[in-house]
DNA sequence: TCAATATACTTACTTAGGTAAGTATTATGA
DNA sequence: TCATAATACTTACCTAAGTAAGTATATTGA
């Protein structure tokens, strides 16, 4: 990565994960696991496909992370009507903890963003969204 | 990761790595390996510590990546005056290829950023830099 | 001087994510 | 109907990066 912008994005991504993990340590969780718990809290029971589509990762990533969440008693996978699907939901333990964790993580993120005004945060988001795949060059955008 | 800003940063970080890897595939390289080659091209021979400090990663990460670069004939590690240190440099093969790779990667990155004006790119950089470790809250900043 | 400490790097183990290929189930079309 | 194709998930293998602990060399201070 040599454009300084991408370098900086990569750095901040790693920093955020590191700091979130520091908070999650107390719950024996990691950032990727938390992202799934948060997802389930927000949307209720979901198939694995719905999870990886929402998080924009590949299917195997979710399979692996869910295996750990299941082992550690945060999530459950049940057979769906379509037997290929597995319906994922939070366990009782998770239900009782997720709100507390969310609060802690939100506070951390607000701290990390405390150097930016609300306006700047929105600006930042807007600018990030303009970064696109190189497969989609200027011409392609016309076909939206 | 639940603040949408951090989610977006994480997504773009992964997207950039994925696309850079696509270009590097042709050279049998990966993004982390390229970041070290680029570093050596820019600064000349360096110790491993200088590399991991510049890239802001941990020492073991550089050890591992260099082992692969050495195996595949892109980098060399020589003993320094201080025998604890290993002085890293590019091989002849690397010297002859690095400029070409840099051009390809730069073009890709420009494509990905083509939706942003020069001004917006600088804005984005400035905003990213304002994201800080939560260990450094507002009060701490005073002590700079 | 030389024992204690610090430094540079490595090793072992873990999470996170990607691709490719495999399995089981469902949907489709001749 | 039933062979073929598509879908949902899993498995195996790879890169990337972190922490903790280990090794070898260099530095420091009593």
Image: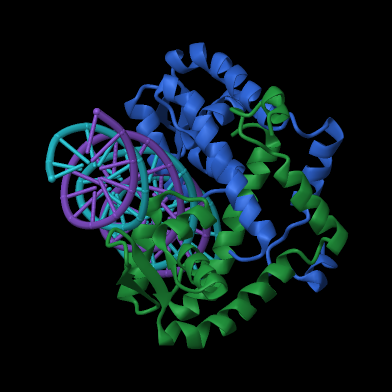
Chain colours: A blue, B green, C cyan, D purple
The residue that appears at 42% across and 87% down in the rendered structure is B92
- Tell which residue pokes out farthest to the top in this image: A96
Q: Is residue A113 above or below residue B35?
A: above
Question: Residue B125: percent from the left, percent from the top?
Answer: 75, 52
Between C11 and B108, the residue placed more toward the observer is C11
Between A2 and A87, the residue placed more toward the observer is A2
The residue that appears at 33% across and 67% down in the rendered structure is B80
* Corner quadrant of residue C19: bottom left
Which quadrant holds the C terminus of chain B? top right
Question: Residue B135: percent from the left, percent from the top?
Answer: 59, 27
Q: Is residue B44 above or below residue B144?
A: below
Question: Residue A81: percent from the left, percent from the top?
Answer: 46, 34
Between A115 and A129, the residue placed more toward the observer is A115
Q: Is residue D2 left or right of residue B43?
A: left
Question: Residue B127: percent from the left, percent from the top?
Answer: 77, 45
Q: Is residue C13 left or right of residue B17?
A: left
The residue that appears at 52% across and 65% down in the rendered structure is B35
């Amino acid at each position: 990565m040599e454009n300084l912008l991408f370098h900086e994005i990569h750095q901040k991504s790693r920093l955020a994960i590191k700091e979130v993990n520091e908070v999650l340590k107390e719950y024996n969780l990691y950032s990727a696991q938390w992202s799934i718990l948060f997802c389930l809290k927000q949307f209720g029971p979901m198939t694995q496909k719905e999870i990886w589509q929402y998080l924009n990762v590949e299917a195997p990533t979710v399979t692996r992370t869910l295996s750990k969440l299941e082992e550690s008693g945060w999530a459950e996978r049940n057979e769906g009507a379509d037997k290929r699907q597995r319906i994922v939901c939070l366990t009782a333990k998770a239900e009782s903890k997720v709100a507390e964790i969310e609060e802690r993580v939100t506070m951390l993120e607000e701290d990390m963003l405390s150097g930016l005004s609300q306006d700047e945060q929105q600006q930042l988001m807007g600018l990030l969204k303009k970064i696109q795949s190189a497969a989609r060059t200027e011409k392609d955008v016309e076909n939206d």
